[in-house]
Amino acid sequence: MTFDARYFDIGRLDRLSYGGSFVHRLDPRAKVIATILFLFTVVSFPKYEVAALAPFFLFPALLLTVGAIPVRFLLRKILIVSPFAFFIGIFNPLLDTQTAVVLFGFAVSAGWLSFLAILLKFALTVSAALLLIATTSFPGICHALRRLGVPALFVSQLLFLYRYLFVLMEEAMRIIRAREMRSFGSHGAGMKMFVRLIGILFLRTVDRAERIYYAMLSRGFQGDIPTLKQSHIALSDLLFLSAMIASLGVFRFFPVAEKLGRVVQELF
């Protein structure tokens, strides 16, 4: 994939957030609270719990369906960062060899269960975070955090980080295009040229950041970024949040997967 394609692939997540579905129209505060509760509930399970995590996949499945988010796009994003979770838990089967359960005559060690639990928790938490960004604009999330009481300094830094990511990508795209127009094929594409491009990008970034900062100061910036759009909690937001809290409580404190498994076992 070329650099231009990677740039527009990152921007696609931002473009998806401006959709018009029911999930997109919900108040950002309700979605932020629901996502935070979802993350804490998922990570609160013991390390050997695998089957109990299965019902939680309903949440990303519903958001994907209602929000019309492309499944392949989301899976590709999860796979890109999955090596981090893989290397965190890959040594569990080697260190924890005690037999935990016997399935179809095969002994499964506790290490494999904890490894699978890490992967499932990773998939659930990352998909929930990505779906929050895909159904809510990032400035909307930041303003929701601010109205929920998060310090202004933290919210401002988060918003600047997101905005300057695209500024940095645009600057890098200009430098790469300029190099390609002045060279032929792979000429001038070695490590030495790469280091020079990184240096040029750093100098341009610092210069641009200073100009933007002085421009913000001249316009009255005092550490907080106000918003002109005032949102209000509606009945649909309260119903969404209540349904989320109730379902998370049921999935967390009742063995839903075990009950469904027994029903299926009795049927067959």
Image (cartoon, helix red, strand yellow):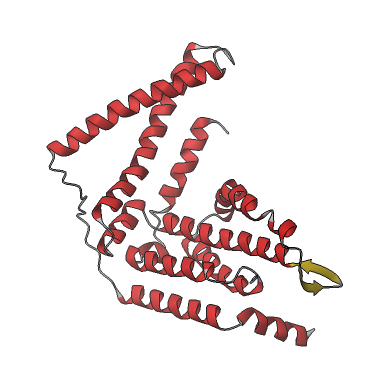
Most foreground residue, 136 or 151: 151
* Residue 27 in sight in this render: no
Most foreground residue, 43 or 66: 43
Q: Which residue lies furthest to the right in this view?
A: 105
Query: How many dots with numbers?
Result: 0
161 with respect to 40 (left or right): left
Task: Give coordinates of residue 184: x percent, y percent.
Answer: 56, 12
Task: Give coordinates of residue 227: x percent, y percent.
Answer: 21, 54
221 with respect to 14 (left or right): left
251 with respect to 33 (left or right): right
Q: Looking at the image, which residue is at 61% across and 53% down?
A: 88
Q: Looking at the image, which residue is at 42% across and 66% down?
A: 36
Task: Give coordinates of residue 30: x percent, y percent.
Answer: 35, 68
Q: Looking at the image, which residue is at 42% across and 33% down?
A: 169
The N terminus lies in which quarter of the figure?
Answer: top right
The C terminus lies in which quarter of the figure?
Answer: bottom right
Task: Give coordinates of residue 126: x percent, y percent.
Answer: 52, 57
Most foreground residue, 97 or 27: 97
* Residue 28 in sight in this render: yes
Q: Looking at the image, which residue is at 51% across and 37% down?
A: 6
173 with respect to 98 (left or right): left
